[in-house]
Amino acid sequence: MKNYTITVNGVAYDVTVEENAAGAPAAPAAPRAAAPKAAPKAAPAKAASEGAGSIKIEAGAAGKVFKIEKKVGDKVTKGDAVVIVEAMKMEIPMVAPSDGTVASIDCVVGDAVEAGTVLATLN
Protein backbone atom coordinates (compact mmCIF):
# COMPACT_ATOMS: atom_id res chain seq x y z
CA MET A 1 0.00 0.00 0.00
CA LYS A 2 1.12 3.53 -0.71
CA ASN A 3 -0.09 6.68 0.96
CA TYR A 4 -0.55 9.94 -0.95
CA THR A 5 -1.86 13.39 -0.20
CA ILE A 6 -4.00 14.86 -2.96
CA THR A 7 -5.19 18.47 -2.98
CA VAL A 8 -8.44 19.31 -4.77
CA ASN A 9 -9.66 22.92 -4.82
CA GLY A 10 -7.48 23.78 -1.85
CA VAL A 11 -8.64 20.83 0.30
CA ALA A 12 -6.01 18.17 1.06
CA TYR A 13 -7.06 14.51 1.21
CA ASP A 14 -4.99 11.58 2.49
CA VAL A 15 -5.50 8.52 0.27
CA THR A 16 -4.17 4.98 0.38
CA VAL A 17 -3.59 3.05 -2.86
CA GLU A 18 -3.35 -0.72 -2.78
CA GLU A 19 -1.12 -2.44 -5.33
CA ASN A 20 -2.47 -5.67 -6.86
CA ALA A 21 -0.63 -8.51 -8.53
CA ALA A 22 -0.61 -8.14 -12.32
CA GLY A 23 -4.01 -9.05 -13.71
CA ALA A 24 -5.63 -9.66 -10.32
CA PRO A 25 -8.96 -7.93 -9.85
CA ALA A 26 -9.01 -5.28 -7.18
CA ALA A 27 -10.85 -6.22 -4.03
CA PRO A 28 -13.46 -3.61 -3.15
CA ALA A 29 -12.30 -1.55 -0.22
CA ALA A 30 -14.58 -0.16 2.41
CA PRO A 31 -14.98 3.56 1.86
CA ARG A 32 -13.02 5.58 4.36
CA ALA A 33 -13.54 9.29 4.77
CA ALA A 34 -10.28 11.14 5.18
CA ALA A 35 -10.33 14.17 7.37
CA PRO A 36 -9.52 17.16 5.18
CA LYS A 37 -6.46 19.10 6.17
CA ALA A 38 -6.53 22.84 6.46
CA ALA A 39 -6.30 24.48 3.07
CA PRO A 40 -3.04 26.28 2.37
CA LYS A 41 -3.14 29.97 3.06
CA ALA A 42 -3.67 32.15 0.03
CA ALA A 43 -0.83 34.41 -0.99
CA PRO A 44 -1.34 37.96 0.24
CA ALA A 45 -2.83 40.30 -2.31
CA LYS A 46 -0.27 42.32 -4.18
CA ALA A 47 -0.16 45.95 -3.21
CA ALA A 48 -0.21 48.47 -6.01
CA SER A 49 3.29 49.37 -7.05
CA GLU A 50 4.52 52.63 -5.62
CA GLY A 51 5.48 53.87 -9.08
CA ALA A 52 2.14 52.86 -10.57
CA GLY A 53 1.10 54.89 -13.57
CA SER A 54 -2.29 56.24 -14.48
CA ILE A 55 -2.84 54.09 -17.59
CA LYS A 56 -3.75 50.48 -16.76
CA ILE A 57 -3.08 47.41 -18.86
CA GLU A 58 -5.61 44.77 -17.80
CA ALA A 59 -6.00 41.09 -18.63
CA GLY A 60 -8.57 40.65 -21.38
CA ALA A 61 -9.34 37.07 -20.39
CA ALA A 62 -8.76 34.66 -17.54
CA GLY A 63 -5.53 32.74 -17.95
CA LYS A 64 -1.91 32.53 -16.87
CA VAL A 65 0.87 35.08 -17.35
CA PHE A 66 3.04 33.46 -20.01
CA LYS A 67 5.68 36.11 -20.69
CA ILE A 68 6.53 39.68 -19.73
CA GLU A 69 7.75 41.56 -22.80
CA LYS A 70 8.66 44.93 -21.25
CA LYS A 71 10.24 46.10 -18.01
CA VAL A 72 9.74 49.18 -15.85
CA GLY A 73 11.17 52.24 -17.58
CA ASP A 74 10.75 50.92 -21.14
CA LYS A 75 9.14 53.29 -23.63
CA VAL A 76 6.17 51.81 -25.49
CA THR A 77 3.97 52.92 -28.34
CA LYS A 78 0.28 52.21 -28.75
CA GLY A 79 -0.16 48.52 -29.63
CA ASP A 80 3.15 47.25 -28.23
CA ALA A 81 2.81 43.95 -26.34
CA VAL A 82 3.66 44.43 -22.66
CA VAL A 83 2.49 41.11 -21.15
CA ILE A 84 1.49 37.84 -22.84
CA VAL A 85 -1.35 35.87 -21.22
CA GLU A 86 -1.98 32.23 -22.09
CA ALA A 87 -5.67 31.32 -22.20
CA MET A 88 -7.10 28.13 -23.69
CA LYS A 89 -3.69 27.27 -25.20
CA MET A 90 -3.51 30.63 -27.01
CA GLU A 91 -0.96 33.34 -26.34
CA ILE A 92 -2.80 36.66 -26.10
CA PRO A 93 -0.77 39.88 -26.04
CA MET A 94 -1.92 42.56 -23.61
CA VAL A 95 -0.94 45.73 -25.43
CA ALA A 96 -0.27 49.34 -24.51
CA PRO A 97 -3.46 51.37 -25.07
CA SER A 98 -1.39 54.49 -25.76
CA ASP A 99 2.19 55.73 -25.99
CA GLY A 100 4.03 55.99 -22.69
CA THR A 101 6.59 54.58 -20.32
CA VAL A 102 6.08 51.39 -18.30
CA ALA A 103 5.57 52.54 -14.70
CA SER A 104 4.93 49.15 -13.08
CA ILE A 105 4.65 45.47 -13.84
CA ASP A 106 2.09 44.04 -11.42
CA CYS A 107 2.43 40.33 -12.22
CA VAL A 108 5.02 37.60 -12.61
CA VAL A 109 5.28 34.73 -15.08
CA GLY A 110 3.01 31.91 -13.93
CA ASP A 111 0.44 34.09 -12.15
CA ALA A 112 -3.17 32.99 -12.67
CA VAL A 113 -5.20 36.08 -13.61
CA GLU A 114 -8.86 36.86 -14.11
CA ALA A 115 -10.25 39.15 -16.79
CA GLY A 116 -9.79 42.74 -15.66
CA THR A 117 -6.74 42.09 -13.45
CA VAL A 118 -4.22 44.94 -13.72
CA LEU A 119 -1.05 43.50 -15.20
CA ALA A 120 0.95 46.70 -15.71
CA THR A 121 0.62 50.47 -15.72
CA LEU A 122 1.99 53.24 -17.92
CA ASN A 123 2.74 56.92 -17.44
Image: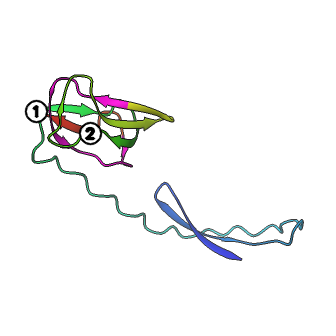
Question: What secondary structure is found at the residue carrying circle 2?
Answer: strand
The x, y position of residue 60, in whole percent, is 34, 29
For the residues labelled 1 and 2, the Cα–Cα distance comes to 14 Å
Residue plotted at (67% across, 75% down): 2
Residue plotted at (71% across, 77% down): 1
Determine whether, in the image, residue 89 is placed left or right of residue 3.
Answer: left
Q: Residue flagged by tag 1: what amino acid is it?
A: Asn
- Magenta residues? 93-113
Badge 2: few (under 14), some or many (20 or more) residues near its Cα, within 10 Å?
Answer: many
- Say which quadrant the C terminus sits in: top left
Residue 62 vertical position relative to residue 41 in the rendered view, above or below: above
Report the front residue among 122 and 28: 122
The x, y position of residue 55, in whole percent, is 15, 30
The x, y position of residue 110, in whole percent, is 39, 49
Residue 83 vertical position relative to residue 31 in the rendered view, above or below: above
Determine whether, in the image, residue 90 is placed left or right of residue 31.
Answer: left
Report the front residue among 61 and 85: 85
Identify the residue position indicated by label 1 in the image: 123
Per the image, is 71 magenta? no
Nearer to us of marks 1 and 2 is: 1
Identify the residue position indicated by label 2 in the image: 119
The x, y position of residue 54, in whole percent, is 11, 33
